[in-house]
Amino acid sequence: MPDPSETDPSRNDTEPPRKEAELARVIRARGLAQGHTPPEIAKDIHDGCAPIHGTTRIKAHRLAHGIALSDVVAQVRALYELDGRPLPKLGETLLSAYESGYKRPGPAYQHDLCRVYRVEPADLGLPGPCVCGRSHGLPRGGVSVVSPREPDVVLRPGVPLTDNARRPPFSASHISGVQYRAEDLRGGAGEEEETVLRRTLLQILAGAGVALDGQILGAVDGVRRRMDDTLVTASVSPTMLDQWEETALGYGKQYTSTPPLRLLCDVLLDFSEVRRMCEQRQPIELQERLCRLAAQLSGLAGAIMINLGDHRLSRSFFRTARTAADETGDRGLRSWVSVREALVPMYYGDPRESLHLARRAQDLAGRTPSAAAAMAPIVEARALGMLVKRGRTDAASSAKRAIARGQAVFSQLSKDHVADTAFGYTERQLAFHIGDTLTNMGDHTHADESLRRALTLYPPSSELDRTLISLDRSWCRLQKGAPDEALDTARQTVLALSPGQFTDIIAQRARQLIGAAVAEYGEITAAAELREVLATPVKAVDEKQT
């Protein structure tokens, strides 16, 4: 029977290594001395280090090879060059997140790691099979299954499978299995949620009043959860993706003019279609575009849920958007998701959390001018303005500096960046948000000036933002000592809303105005009248129409 110390490095006469790298080095050295293969050594490292250091299987394989993070990244890049593909955005930071278990690699990067380490997804602790449908493991004797001179299978749309690969194509049974799975999923449980959303959309188009009830919210969250379930698996043509990307940009242009619930139904029906495309196997080079679409649509759904007043579902959609954005490796997209998410705690939580998310968005955006890089400092300023309103007067100077930073980045944006209200950042939004910040800081003179300018820039169809701007101007009137005028203006603003445009975010801002007026001036008549309008929004619309 062998000495236990020969197989267990922690059972020696001397003290066992304390650091993960040192312990892994001892296990690797003994494995090499005994003629073990890297996958076998990786298993030993995981078994020996995981109980002590929590070492993941992905990291164990790198330690088994005795290489650094930069070596793995260089190996992946070399494989892409050999295949004639654009270099990936995989870096040491993202790879480290995979190794720590903080993030899970998507199908594309999972495929790359399997190629580098010559193992299967299960060996890395990841779900399989690999997206390429082929084996990466080392056969007995350690000879590589894939020749180093021969690139892996790269599928190109419109080209027969046998022409895409230098090696034999997938087996007929494998292809039929993929087709069966896709057909089975098309008729899955997701149809029930889509039916609810379609029925809701038809009712809205027919002019019927639709309440945001539990069934609709269940369908909304069901669509989001199914996207979460399928982001890590996944054929779609580039032309089809072009069309979906144009559709997503179209939703961005409709964001401030279409009633939120109707837009949500449209967005989620397309979001559900993108999910079905993710469920099917696809060329690796198209995976990033699909994930980008998923992140944009999920982020847009989260922004709409802010307007509808459900901050829990809004946070869930932004979480899904972060998952999809991380798969792309696009810092600009991740920054956009973060800055949009910062609006949730701004309206429905703690402004300090909003401040944290806005600053994280700025870190992600870096020094490259982008819509998110311009919006993030302004959101930071809005959060600081809310802290000033709560008594943190020392935050006023920081808010002004943040506004200056945001304006400086905004002046560098291209025309495309300043033309989209959802995925970009427009001049009218900038004026509105600066006015909102100054209102919270008590600078009602400059605030009203900025808000008036914003109203001249917003088209009449942008009812939601125009209403929020008008409510901010009512705050300015209240600060000037005119409570009756402030509350009456707010009441007329709410009465002027079209059906479907009265949402929780408007009601909340109006109630805050009432609370501030009553706290300073008591229960005046104008407060009771505005409160009555908020309690019966349908009646208010009828009065406006008559």
Image (cartoon, rainbow, N blue to C red):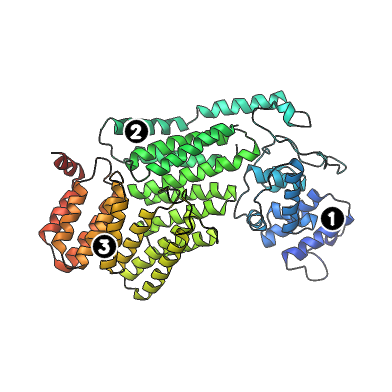
Question: What is the x, y in percent for residue 53?
Answer: 68, 62
Visible in this render: residue 271? no
Circle 1 SS class: helix
Question: What is the x, y in percent for residue 174?
Answer: 69, 27
Residue at the extreme left of the image, as rendered: 525
Residue at 77 percent across and 65 percent down: it is 22
Image quarter hosting the N terminus: bottom right
Image quarter hosting the C terminus: top left
**Amino acid type at mark 3:** Asp
Residue at 28 percent across and 46 percent down: it is 463
Residue 385 appears left or right of 511: right
Mark 1 and mark 2 lie on one chain; the one further toward the N terminus is: 1
Mark 2 and mark 3 lie on one chain; the one further toward the N terminus is: 2
The residue carrying mark 3 is: 448
341 vs 483: above or below? above
Visible in this render: residue 205? yes
Q: Do callouts 1 and 2 mark residues in contact (Cβ within 8 Å)?
A: no
**Amino acid type at mark 2:** Leu
The residue carrying mark 1 is: 31
The residue carrying mark 2 is: 201
The number of numbered badges drawn on the structure is: 3
Q: CA distance from mark 1 to mark 3?
A: 73 Å
193 vs 114: above or below? above
Q: CA distance from mark 1 to mark 2?
A: 63 Å
Nearer to me, 392 or 144: 392
Nearer to me, 184 or 74: 74
Nearer to me, 392 or 366: 366
Dot 3 surroundings within 10 Å: few (below 14), some, or many (20 or more)?
many
Q: CA distance from mark 2 to mark 3?
A: 37 Å
The nearer-to-camera label among 1 and 2 is: 2
Residue at 33 percent across and 70 percent down: it is 388
